[in-house]
Image (tube, rainbow, N blue to C red):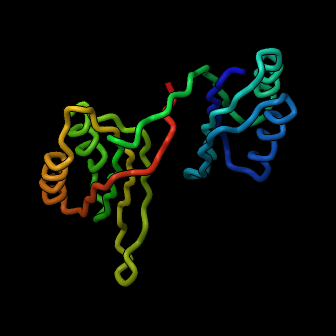
Amino acid sequence: MKNLIITASGSDRSGIVSEISEVITTHGGNFEESRMSRMGSEFAIIMLISISLDMEESLLVALQSIKGLTISTQYTGVKDVSDANKYQIDLMGADNEGIVKVLSEYLAKKSINIIELDTHITHAPVSGTPLFNLKAIILLPENKNSEKIHTDLTHISQKLGVKITLNKSESIIELV
């Protein structure tokens, strides 16, 4: 068995998930993980599947025949990530330009790996003001102290005028 990452995007329409999952399943592929979302008028998919060596070539040909989707594939290994140094960052506040840039720059400078990142906009209940929401799963290096990171994130929170929390996170799988 091989592990394959499939990314696909195209104009949103009914049946995209059904069509791509049909192709994968009929070629003996098994879904391991996936993220699928409508973004604007487009639909985007990223998934990890496992597939037997004898079916991979016909799967790749069949995937490329799906009309209206731009599809790319990449082989990968799978590696478990220890819970010991895994944390979740939650951020919420006024939707200001540069929030992701400031947070990701800080994490990169501290050699902290972002495993997952999800952002979306909600609206405040009474005023309807756009609120930016971010959830990130990060992996702290062995030599990093979570209390120091928490203190730094508090300063970033004050600078950006948002609320940031840092907590231990659940088990995840890291792709390599």
Name the residue at 39% across, 53% down.
Answer: 135
Nearer to the camera, 56 or 171? 171
In the rendered view, tell whether residue 111 sits above or below residue 58. Answer: below
Name the residue at 62% across, 47% down.
Answer: 36
In the rendered view, tell whether residue 98 sits above or below residue 65. Answer: below
- Residue at the far bottom: name it: 126
Name the residue at 65% across, 25% down.
Answer: 4
Quadrant in the picture for residue 126: bottom left
In the rendered view, tell whether residue 112 sits above or below residue 36. Answer: above
Image coordinates of residue 82 in percent, x first then y, are: 41, 37
Name the residue at 14% across, 60% down.
Answer: 158
Residue 35 as seen in the image, left or right of residue 64 = left
Image coordinates of residue 174 in percent, x first then y, are: 48, 33
* Number of numbered tags placed on the structure image: 0
Quadrant in the picture for residue 116: top left
Residue 134 as seen in the image, left or right of residue 144 = right
Image coordinates of residue 144 in percent, x first then y, are: 20, 37
- Residue at the far right: name it: 26
Residue 65 as seen in the image, left or right of residue 168 = right
Image coordinates of residue 95 in percent, x first then y, are: 31, 60
In the rendered view, tell whether residue 18 sits above or below residue 25. Answer: below
Residue 170 as seen in the image, left or right of residue 44 = left
The quarter of the rendered structure image containing the N terminus is top right
